[in-house]
Image (cartoon, rainbow, N blue to C red):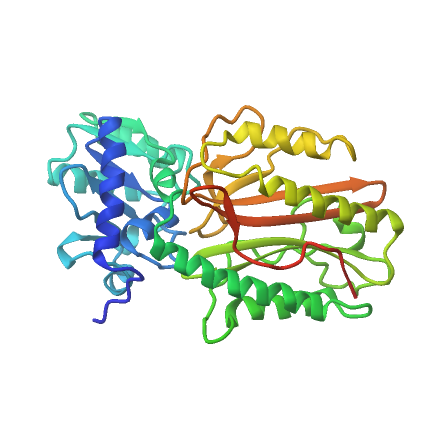
Amino acid sequence: MENQAVFEKTEYLARIRKVHHRMADLDIDTLLVVDPANMNYLSGYDGWSFYAHQGLLVRLDEDVPYWFGREQDRSGALLTTWLPEDHLFTYPEHYVQSFSDHTMRFVASVLASNRWDKGRLGVELDGYWYSAKSHIELQQRLPGTTLVDADRLVNWVRTYKSEKELVLMREAASICTHVMETAFSVIKEGVHERSAAAAVAAAQIEGIDGIGGDSPAIFPIMPAGPRTVAGHLTYDPQRAYRNGDIVMLELSGCRKRYHMPLYRTMCIGKPSANLISMAAIMDDAFTALLDCIMPGSVAETIERQWRAIMAPHHVLAPARVGYAFGLNYVPDWGEHTVNLRPGEKTVLAEHMTIHLIASLRIGSDVFETSEPVLVTGNGCTRFMDVPRALHCS
């Protein structure tokens, strides 16, 4: 079977070594990885199969991790990962969504049969895919094992991008630029919101210049008119755009599960003087914000600088103004590590990718914008050159 892993084996081995360093710091013998993005990062596995239990077992004393999943997903593991066949453990169908059995009993049996059940087992304790039931089953089935909170251990390794990862992220940026231009061209008075959303989703998958896209972790968020008062709403499937609508666009390109998000604001028809002023303020403010991003900057300090930049124009409530992003699956493209917000002591470093985000609301008008950036040795660089100006149709 032809192997379709995205990266060469050497890239994955380098990632495993970094994970091993963090495991050693926590005295972890075995790491249970169930987050699909973390699985992909370490093994290449790319099945849309995370509705059933699956994961990796990373041993501190071995360079090659072990995959476990449903028997029917074994071929997908052989196709998308760099792992040898003897590192694939599969369980039968009776475990899937069973009321009488649980897949972690199978995992516990794998650990026990390989004599990996007497040390410290790291688990992604706050992960979306690591349930309370999973934790209880492991506790009950592995009495000689100490369960250790290793939540976001792999996520923090993912925060620092390799040059090969950045190639994919730049391709995702090309797709995102195309996606945003598609939105600008199709959103017009009288057009149904669903039609615009369909065109945007098609552009995300079709890609550009022969570079095909993946469906992003977040469906196109593009509320218009009355729906802009709330965060994270998408289109209204029965509504058509109207003159005077403000449209918020939170879109992304995605290449081999690596994301490139971007926020922009549109207005249908003639914008108010207030909205024009807000757009100009935010454009200038973001130019100043980009100058604050550099290696050695502390996350909370950047948020504080952002509030100082905006103070002459509008009082902002303390909130995050950016976060780390990259490889991910549903429900979001954030890495759940770096957040630029009050109280956050994380120090930015070269090769981090940060999505800078901000919105301003005055009266009934709202303007939102963002910039995904790469932290470099002496500052940051933008991934795209899509104007932040208010776009009117």
Residue 49: image quadrant is: bottom left
Can residue 230 be seen in this snapshot? no
Question: From what the image shows, is residue 333 above or below residue 121?
Answer: below
Residue ID at (33%, 53%): 40
68 or 319, which lies in front? 319
Q: Position of residue 149 (x, y in %)?
A: 33, 28
- Relative placement, left or right, of 33 versus 345 is left
Q: Estimate the x, y position of residue 325 in percent, counting from the top left.
A: 48, 46
From the viewer's perspective, tell me whether residue 25 is left or right of residue 279. Answer: left
Q: Residue furthest bottom?
A: 210
Q: Which residue is at the front of the view, 97 or 334?
A: 334
| 145 left or right of 34 in image | left
Give the quarter of the image for residue 76.
bottom left
Residue 25, position as x, y percentages in the image: 25, 27
- Location of residue 203 (image quadrant): bottom right
Horizontally, residue 231 falls left or right of residue 68, namely: right
Q: Nearer the viewer, residue 74 or 267?
A: 267
Residue at screen point 79% across, 45% down: 278
The residue located at (52%, 65%) in the rendering is: 174
Instruction: Please provide percent x and percent y for residue 287.
Output: 64, 45
Quadrant (top left, top right, bottom left, bottom right) of the C terminus: bottom right
Q: How many numbered discs?
A: 0
Classify the position of the N terminus by image quarter.
bottom left
Residue at 80 percent of width and 64 percent of height: 241
Please name whichever residue, 220 or 15, is drawn nearer the observer in this view of the structure.
Answer: 15
In the image, residue 229 sits, relative to residue 217, either above or below, namely above
Residue 256 visible to an observer of this rendering? yes
